[in-house]
Image (cartoon, grey):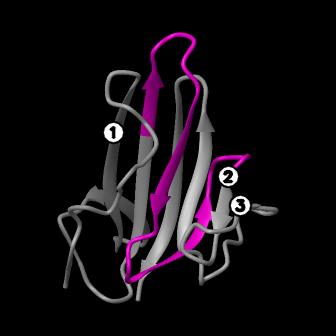
């Protein structure tokens, strides 16, 4: 089992300039439908949903970078201007289709110029 704590680490944002929060959920199938519930542990094959919210101070503009936790294979994301890295954050490219993230993605990056939210889905390897 993998603990859910620490699934999101952000960089480049200064605490006094931006408020960041994240929540991690696991998808469970029950009674023929899919339910999302808060998670504290995962097992191989679990489908994980992470939601990140940010609220910068007025006029602030940030780039948020987060490593993809080891053991997760990203599947999709909701942010239209998401950038990805497959080499540890050395080089970046814009994600063409947020429903198709390369399995070898190591980092995510996006601009946070206004209050917003990003969610992404992954599978525990």
Q: In x, y percent, where is residue 79? A: 65, 47
Which residue: 67% across, 52% down? Answer: 82
Is 59 situated above or below 103?
A: above
Q: Quadrant of the N terminus?
A: bottom left
Task: Read off the residue under disc 2.
Answer: 82
Which residue: 20% across, 62% down? Answer: 5
Mark 3 touches mark 2? (CB < 8 Å): yes
Question: Marks 3 and 2, Cα distance to the nearest angstrom?
Answer: 8 Å
**Residue 21, which numbered label?**
1
12 sits left or right of 103 in the view: left
Q: Which residues are magenta?
A: 53-82
Q: Is residue 69 magenta?
A: yes
Which residue: 32% across, 29% down? Answer: 15
Q: Earlier in the sequence, mark 3 or mark 2?
A: 2
Q: In x, y percent, where is residue 32? A: 42, 72
Q: In x, y percent, where is residue 53? A: 43, 36
User: Which mark's residue is nearer the viewer, 3 or 2?
Assistant: 2
Label 2 element class = loop
**Residue 98, which numbered label?**
3
- Tally of numbered discs: 3
């Amino acid at each position: 089992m993998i603990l859910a704590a620490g699934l999101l680490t952000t960089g480049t944002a200064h605490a006094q300039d931006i408020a960041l929060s994240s929540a991690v959920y696991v998808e469970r199938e029950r009674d023929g439908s899919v339910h999302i519930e808060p998670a504290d542990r995962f097992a191989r094959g679990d489908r994980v949903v992470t939601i990140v919210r940010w609220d910068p101070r007025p006029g602030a503009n940030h780039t948020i970078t987060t490593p993809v936790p080891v053991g997760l294979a990203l599947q999709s994301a909701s942010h239209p201007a998401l950038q990805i890295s497959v080499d540890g954050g050395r080089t970046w490219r814009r994600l063409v289709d947020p429903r198709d993230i390369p399995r070898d993605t190591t980092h995510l990056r996006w601009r946070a110029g206004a209050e917003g939210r990003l969610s992404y889905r992954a599978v525990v390897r």
